[in-house]
Image (tube, helix red, strand yellow):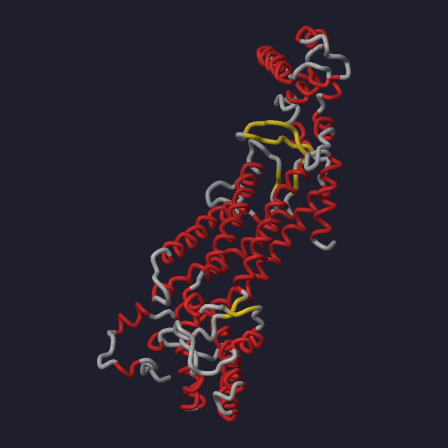
Amino acid sequence: MSTKKLWGGRFQQQASEWVDQFGASISFDQLMADEDIEGSLAHVKMLGHTKILKMDDVNQIVAGLVGLREDLHAGKLEFTVENEDIHMNIEALLTERIGPVAGKLHTARSRNDQVATDFHLYLKNRLPKVIDEITTLQKTLVEMAEKNVETIMPGYTHLKHAQPISYGHYLMAYYQMLKRDKERFVFSMKHTDMLPLGAAALAGTTFPIDREYTAKELGFAQVYPNSLDAVSDRDFALEFLSNSSILMMHLSRFCEEISMWVSHEFKYLELSDAYTTGSSIMPQKKNPDMAELIRGKSGRVYGHLIGLLSTMKSLPLAYNKDLQEDKEGTFDTVKTLLPALKVFNGMLKTAKPNVERMKAATENDFSNATELADYLATKGIPFREAHGIVGQLVLKVLETHQNLQDMSLEDLQAASPKIEEDVYHDLKSEVAVERRHSLGGTGFDQVRLQIKNAKQELGE
């Protein structure tokens, strides 16, 4: 392959080898080789369509690019640092294959709009995969929630037992988070589905190009209306990294709870052996390493977002070499996000809730205290007064090592004569959950409604 710089006409000195290596991006942007060839095919077809190039030239270039794509898929292409990036490597390989006519491919375009197009295509091709993995995880959550509508567990605030809830309700909370995640990725498709090609270096071109034709060839919904913006915009990548960071935050929160739920102190969940590891020294250990690793990788994705924001914050229009730093973090985020979703889905799908342990945890924790306060409120006592009465009762049973439901009716009535025998029914944790019929609440009927609505959203 020729190593003469394709842009080197006005240069008298060659850069040192280490300078070439520092400036080159081929080590990572070769991941866009398919997209680069795809963009070049559309571009040269447009050049033929507009009669900027003769069809004989177009046909030679198309045949050469198709041959390169076949070799790429067969693993036969070799790229060099001397040719800097994927664009110049492909052009150099094409020149070797079909001769000087390959040089006509770059008519009416620049590497500036070419790299932006490749990058748009890269994310455009991968966003649907991310959305599909989120949908798969949503379906798993709905499936598990449906099996656990009447599974009772403690609900927490400040990591302290607050009120009993349905485990199905808990799972559906994460469904809603993922729903928002998916909506964000779907929306970001709008800004990814824009074609920069035709903006050239920054100011457009004097050639009579047809950008709408190129957009149609590549399947883009629209073209950038401003050439300066087209080559310098990386909002679509920032949106992807931001959306990925929020998604990883949601997975990390869930993984944090899973790591607690499987501990000896909680024992709420049992993870499959397929998603845990052992210890090299402690034979009894079964560690939730996949949950911990996903939790840890959230920081990795955050770093890529902050990195690109920092790169972009001081860039003047239009293109700057700094923008070469936009890809590695994005590529790594794709590489991190898709496996994380897949592994998390498998881990959750095979996890077994300890139904008895979860419910037992709600029976000795005073999480029914609100039920007693609500009970008194329904008897006409102002809620603030009822709150104080129950607080005094909790203090009393703490001293006697009892629970509210274990107190005698006589002792309860000493605190308030409004309390009657039916209070014991209301103090049961399953009753406390079942009675919460407010829209979006943890009542069994409301959880089933959430599941029904989710199935409709998922097209099931």
- Tell which residue pokes out farthest to the bottom in this image: 56
Q: Quadrant of residue 422?
A: top right
Position of 205 with respect to 419 (left or right) is: left
Residue drawn at (54%, 50%), measured in percent from left and top?
247
Q: Quadrant of residue 380?
A: top right
Quadrant housing the N terminus = bottom left
Q: From this viewpoint, is residue 287 visible?
A: no
**Total count of labels:** 0
In-front residue for pair 16/276: 16
In-front residue for pair 230/373: 230
Q: Is residue 124 above or below residue 48?
A: above
In-front residue for pair 46/351: 46
Q: Is residue 189 above or below residue 40?
A: above
Q: Position of residue 449 (x, y in %)?
A: 74, 41
Q: Position of residue 297 (x, y in %)?
A: 47, 50
Q: Is residue 222 above or below residue 82?
A: above
Q: Position of residue 425 (x, y in %)?
A: 75, 20
